[in-house]
Image (cartoon, rainbow, N blue to C red):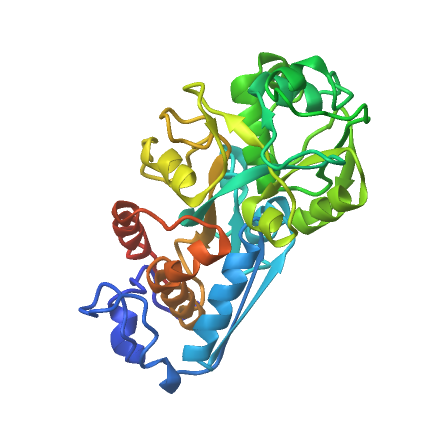
Amino acid sequence: MLGVKNKPLIGLLSIIFAFSMMGCGAQNPGTPSGQDKAAKVNLTGAGSSFVYPLLNQQIEEYRKMNSNITINYQSTGSGAGIKQVTEQTLDFGATDGPMTEDQIKAAKGGKLLHIPLTLGAVAVTYNVPNAPKNLKIAPADLSDIFLGKITNWNDQRIATNNPGVALPDTKITVAHRSDGSGTTYIFSDYLSSVSPEWSSKVGKGTSLNWPAGIGGKGNAGVAGAIQQTPGSIGYLELAYAVQNNLPYATMQNKEGKWITPSLQSTSAAAAATTIPEDMRVSIVNAPGADVYPIAGFTWVLIYQDQKDKTKGTALVNFVNWAIHEGQNLSEGLQYAKLPASLVGREEAMLKTITF
């Protein structure tokens, strides 16, 4: 520590370091002007693979504006990100599944803030010979597939929702995450919300005891398993499905409408959900005719009390830029922009960070 406790990183440090900071009169919050005069800073983060395509691009763009900051983010999975930030071996973590009360209490550095960085859709992807894109899969059928109860693609329950489609008599192979994963949390949270049997037998979490299937590490690992396994079905963050040219299913939402994952249907899920003060919220199976039902936030995990004011200031600046200008990178990578009303609340959260 630096001998000064509980001083706000926004405001006071803008004077100390001559930063143009949010909360101190800057017209463009998060813009790193003035940081060229500061000492070089190295920040480390890890966690969510769900957010990696976006966060990696944001880091690259931010680096172009500020050569004094190096940010190293590793796509290790949300479970690993939570564990490492809890143990204080990282400057920040990222997760698609909110921390549990026990995890929050175990954090060695005090209170951890959940700051939404983006929101995205989890796509149900598959590799079925001669099958069309956008197969319709009902909620109960999806849960039974992952429970190992529906075992062939030409099962009558799947065929009923896809009239005119010649589904092959091919064995279904489930592909899932083998590591602690926020994508798994979102997907299992959805299955728990639509299937009492899934909820009681498997439940939701970043790591599960899967009833069936093969595992892959990270979204990239699951994408590879699906590509290499005819008859397979799995779940991926939408960006990975698009990047790997994998077809993805049309899902039936809470209102009974068939919806494909998209920026608009993902944003609709967030708009239909009341977001609490601490930002830990599920947006799966949200109400609304235009809502895609398997969607979620990715949160950056930051300690409210930063032990190093230089690093803390650099981290606050980057996150502030990421939720403002950095959102312009979102849609090209299949992520939905944060709602403007939510960004204002996140600014208030950033102002509470102290050293």
The residue at 73%/40% (across/down) is: 178
Residue visible at 37% across and 51% down in the picture: 337
Q: Residue furthest left?
A: 25
Query: How many numbered discs sit on the rendered protein?
Result: 0
Question: Is residue 337 in view from this perspective?
Answer: yes
Q: Which residue appears at 62% of the width and 60% of the height?
A: 74
The answer to whether residue 91 is visible is no
Percent x, y of residue 29:
27, 65
- Looking at the image, which residue sits at the far bottom? 37
**Considering the image in quadrants, where does the N terminus appear?**
bottom left
Q: Nearer the viewer, residue 103 or 206?
A: 206
Spot occupied by residue 111 in the image (x, y as percentages of width and height): 42, 47
Q: Is residue 129 above or below residue 240?
A: above
In what quadrant of the picture does the C terminus appear?
bottom left
- Among the 4 quarters of the image, the one containing residue 10: bottom left
Figure check: 155 above or below 45: above
The answer to which of 308 and 175 lies nearer the viewer is: 175
| Residue 202 in the figure: left or right of residue 23 | right
Seen in the image, is 135 located left or right of residue 332?
right
* Image position, residue 231 (x, y; %): 78, 33
Q: 66 or 257, which is in the foreground?
A: 257
Q: Quadrant of residue 126?
A: top right
Q: Residue 129, how many percent across, how many down?
A: 76, 36
User: Which residue lies at the image location 43% right of the left edge and 56% below the top edge?
Assistant: 330
Asked if 338 appears above or below 316 in the picture, the reply is: above
